[in-house]
Amino acid sequence: MIVPKKIERVVIFGGGGLVGYQICRLIAREVKPEKMVVCTLLEKEALETIALLSDEFKAEGTEFIAEYGNIFVREEYAKLAKGEIQADQEILSTIYNDVFGDLNDDPDNISNKGLMPKIIMKYRPDVVVDCVNTATAISYQDVKSSSNVVKEFRDAIGDVINPGIKTTIENAKSGDKESIEKLCAFATNFIEQSTDAIESFPHLTNLKMVDLLLISQAIPQLVRHVTLLYNSLNKAKTHIYIKVGTTGTGGMGVNIPFTHGEDKPSFKLMAKTSVGFAHTGLLFLLARSPGPIIKEIKPGAMIGYRRVVYKEIKKFGEPVVLSESRKEILGDSLKIRQDKSTYRLKGNLSLVGIDTGENGFFSRGEYETITYMDSMEFVTPEEIARNVLHEIAGSNTGKDIIAAIDGAIMDPSYRAGLIRQAAVDEMREEERVHGIPSIAIGELGPPQLSKLLYETHLLRQVFPKLEDWASPEVSVEQMSELVLKYVEKSEIREIITSLGLAILLPDGKTIFRGPTMYIPESKVHVDVPINDGDIDSWANHGWIDLRISNFKLWKERAQKMLNSRDHKFTEGSASVGPDIYSSRMIKTGEVVGWILSTEFDGSRRK
């Protein structure tokens, strides 16, 4: 665990919002960092916020820096409007790869190009406070409407693509005029369905809507966002990350009466809540992983307010025009949008209301209703900011939801520890009775675990003592040769390959395999090309590797295991831990558990 030090650099995502601004003010006043980076969606908001902070805290010596843009996309797209992104096929394709592709160190990868990772790596903050309403940003992408449009598109194409189309194609190939005309009509219909503008979304086509639906799925986006965050925080050696999260409904239940006009329970609000608590679950995982301290404050009421003001009312970014009403007799259909120019217009509508920041601008009636007793009510941004500051300082506010979950979940038990050994002993006896070793099936996820277990087992069969593995008298060439001989004559070979693992022989060009292989992984293609570096990658991720290079690694591991149990500064209970291999025997699972804990940094942190 990283112990907090003096806070010199702070990044506040969403620093121009109602809560973010108050957090900026409290940290500037109480902590006085050297640099405070205020990140907002819009440039104007960022510049106005740092101007206010600089004016208020000019005597404190803190440098206020403005950053702006959409932190969920690449820096090059972060300043683009939503419509600009949706209209560009190349951008949509890139975002798809950013969400579903691999993360690596390639300079053009999202891990290096994303606005959020770039900001974190640029300033390497001691503290990151995230006030962005992530659940809203990710869930409010109207997946329901996109799904409806794509389903209509699929049904329209499906009506044409029926079993008879194959016959039509074959007949057309033979020169049948009627079939050629049908095929041309089908092609024309398909192109029109694919490329014509959608009535409700004139800047989109059905094909683009398919792309949009793919990249708008909440869970893949959220997982990628949190993964990028975690990697960036670790690289920057950030000490504390605090999220100001959301319940999705202001602390209310599915009976919440404040929706967006849809039926109750609201699909949109339930989707938002789902993402909000999925986000909490992922932060819970980060809190149990190596890296910074992770906390989340989750307000359960409306947050407000900033000011009371008389201003112009806008809907969907456009001013509401006050127009003279018109009487209409209802018939068989109803046109929900008409040309405004056919109405007598009286100018833009302005009203007195209350600015509640990200929650919106409410009329007096709306504000009285939403804050009514036992309704949503409200909590002030200053109260939230104070809890954030206390958590940064290490005080126990009781409002960190990650700590609350930690205190509520059931931990490993003493009873289970006793039963573990009894179960292991019983399995060993059954193995002896049936004459077959129980090493790995592949039920614990990645083939890499099975690979390590089987490699440990093979080494143990040839070299029964850990000291033999580490001994300079046993060369890596001997280890490779003797283990290969054992594999060639042992039935364990068929068990390994039948389970989908390959055994790479010392020449690096030959394998033992079964009918199915799980590395390389592909659920789409049966034939996978072998490119430079692929064999090394596959051997590392799931092949039993009998090459000399791998036995060099096993020798190093064996020496580290021996050193760990012989450490002269540890005794008593301090000599037992996940980083110390204390057994005098080679226990397959214990060896791999030690490797996962030390080499892969895979032990739980709480």
Image (cartoon, grey):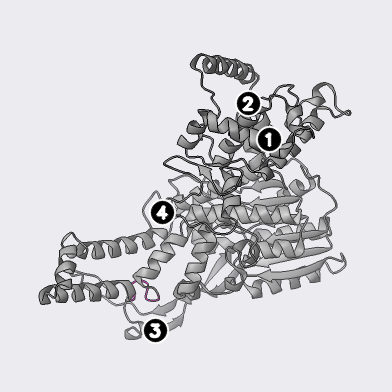
- Residue visible at 65% across and 70% down in the picture: 68
Q: Which residue is mark 3?
A: 345
Q: Where 92 sits versus 527, above or below?
A: below
Direction from residue 180 to residue 546 in the image, left or right? right
Closer to the eye: label 2 or 3: 2
Q: Which mark is residue 461?
A: 2
Question: Residue 8: horizontal and vertical position, in percent?
Answer: 83, 58
2 and 1 marks in contact (CB < 8 Å): no
Q: Amino acid at mark 1?
A: Met
Direction from residue 324 to residue 61 in the image, left or right? right
- Residue range in magenta is 197-203
Label located before the other in sequence (2 or 1): 2
Label located before the other in sequence (4 or 3): 3
Q: Quadrant of the N terminus?
A: top right
Q: Which mark is residue 479?
A: 1
Closer to the eye: label 4 or 3: 4
Frontmost residue, 493 versus 387: 493
Label located before the other in sequence (1 or 4): 1
How many numbered callouts? 4
4 and 3 marks in contact (CB < 8 Å): no
Q: Where 402 sits versus 96, above or below?
A: above
